[in-house]
Amino acid sequence: MKNALLITLIGTIFISGGAVAQERHTKDPRNASGKIGVEVDHHGELKLAFGNGAKNWYGENENEVIFLLEFETESNDGRFRFVNFDDRFGGIYADIISTKNESVLNTVGYMLPITADNGNTLFFPSINYSYLAVDEKNSLRSDVPKEFGGGNNSHLSSLNLYILHPWNDTHFTFIEMFGGHSFDGVEMEMYDLCWTQGMNSTILNSPATVYFKGQYTRTEVFGEFAPNGSINDEETTFSFGLDIKF
């Protein structure tokens, strides 16, 4: 109930600004339009999403403020993203990923939108700082000796790259890449690659996006923090979803 009230409150704050936002491509990170979405992966995990934003809400320069909430109904994993894009300096954002029994990954970063010479392909590279807090229920806490910090946290420098290529007014490809390497705490590396193939359409008389997504995630803990030399965790998922704009 509290989560529902929070989402309603945030939506009320941002909906007026998002409704008048200049139209950008549906997968452009600067798109401040409101959306609700649902996604299901090949394991049957259901993900719900709600996002909104405001355009030109301060100053006289072009700017966007955007947030996105995601919640997975079976695992209770959640994600919150907030970004402020400004045509004077690029984008500054925060990204919080919480898993029920394992960890919370907090990331802050700077993103620079780049348009290719073809005027069509967009690149969004970013440089980030990430802090991983590991829950006591995570197996890593029992694998790492207490004299090495107990495996309770890690500080990472990380890089992101988003690539958006619209093939035409209907079809597009969106690629997300993430890589992080620790410089303090538990020695680890994190990688994530996500490929989305989408189609713009109309559902219930509203603009919508239907998409198929494949994602590969890998985390490796190594050095003195891994009793057997390294601890690897990787996962590949395939998902189908849709977003409805408002």
Image (tube, rainbow, N blue to C red):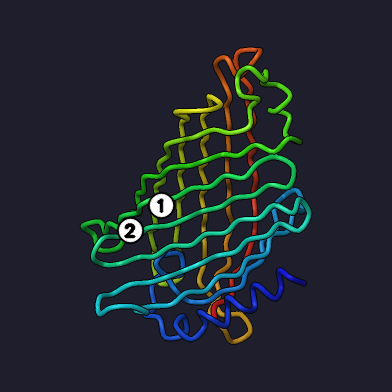
Q: Position of residue 33 (x, y in %)?
A: 47, 76
Sequence order check: which comes first, mark 2 or mark 1? 2
The kind of residue on which mark 1 rests is: Tyr
Question: Which residue is drawn at the image coordinates 56% and 39% (left, top)?
Answer: 132
- Location of residue 184 with respect to 50 vertically, above or below: above
User: Is the C terminus in the top left, top right, bottom left or bottom right quadrant?
Assistant: bottom right
Query: Is residue 36 toward the left or the right of residue 13 in the image?
Result: right
Q: Secondary structure at mark 2?
A: strand
Percent x, y for residue 168? 39, 68
The amino acid on which the numbered mark 2 sits, given as a three-letter code, is Leu
Q: Are marks 2 and 1 in contact (CB under 8 Å)?
A: yes
How would you rate the neighbour count of disc 2 (Cα within 10 Å): few for under 14, some for 14-19, many for 20 or more? some
- Image point 71% across, 68% down: which residue? 3
Q: Residue at x 44, y 28 (%)?
A: 183
Relative placement, left or right, of 235 versus 155 is: right
Q: Nearer the viewer, residue 80 or 192?
A: 80
Locate residue 77 relative to residue 74 in the image: left or right. left
- In the figure, residue 151 lies in which quadrant? top right
Q: Quadrant of the N terminus?
A: bottom right
Can you identify the residue that label 1 sits on? 162
Q: Secondary structure at mark 1?
A: strand
Residue 166 in percent (x, y) is at: 39, 63
Query: Residue 193: x percent and y percent?
Result: 51, 42
Q: Residue furthest left?
A: 117
Q: Which mark is residue 122?
A: 2
